[in-house]
Amino acid sequence: MPATIRAPFARYSHGIEVPPGRGLIATSGQLGIAPDGHVPEGVEAQAALCFGNIEAILAEAGADRTSVIRLNAFVTDRAHMAGYMTARDAWLAEVSPPPASTLMIVTGFTRPEFLVEIEVLAVR
């Protein structure tokens, strides 16, 4: 991290370099919906499902959470930031350095019960 800028606000890196010879994996935004269509109440539970979906996508591509270099998340209200960050920090607890990360507040998603959407870039 450059010494000339403020340290990150939370557990993320300002920038991550892709090592030479590594391929990129991009996920679509994942919503907190189970395979049976159930959408749990609460942003933390929905975010945990999003991260579970991302984990499955990465595994299919031969990668895992340690391969993530960028995380973009969208929540529908500032009140959802803490629950999202709890789920994110748990998912990244053993990842070092943590990926670059952006969190945005949006007006909503395709269905009103969705509170969070998460997408990642990873390297293989």
Image (cartoon, helix red, strand yellow):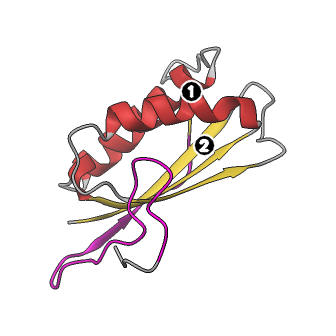
Q: Is residue 28 left or right of residue 39?
A: left
Point out the stretch of residues depicted in magenta.
5-30
Three-letter amino acid code of the residue under disc 2: Glu
Residue at mark 1 to residue at mark 2: CA–CA distance: 13 Å
Residue 65: x and y in percent read 27, 47
The total number of labels drawn is 2
- Is residue 7 visible in the rendered structure shown here? yes
Residue 121, image x, y percentages: 40, 63
Residue of label 2: 117
Q: Is residue 17 magenta?
A: yes
Between residue 71 and residue 64, name the one nearer to us: 71
Closer-to-camera residue (54/72) = 72
Residue 123 sits in which quadrant?
bottom left
Q: Which residue is mark 1?
A: 83
In the figure, 25 relative to 57: above or below? below
**How far across and down, in percent of the image, does residue 9 sit?**
51, 52
Residue lying farthest bottom? Answer: 20
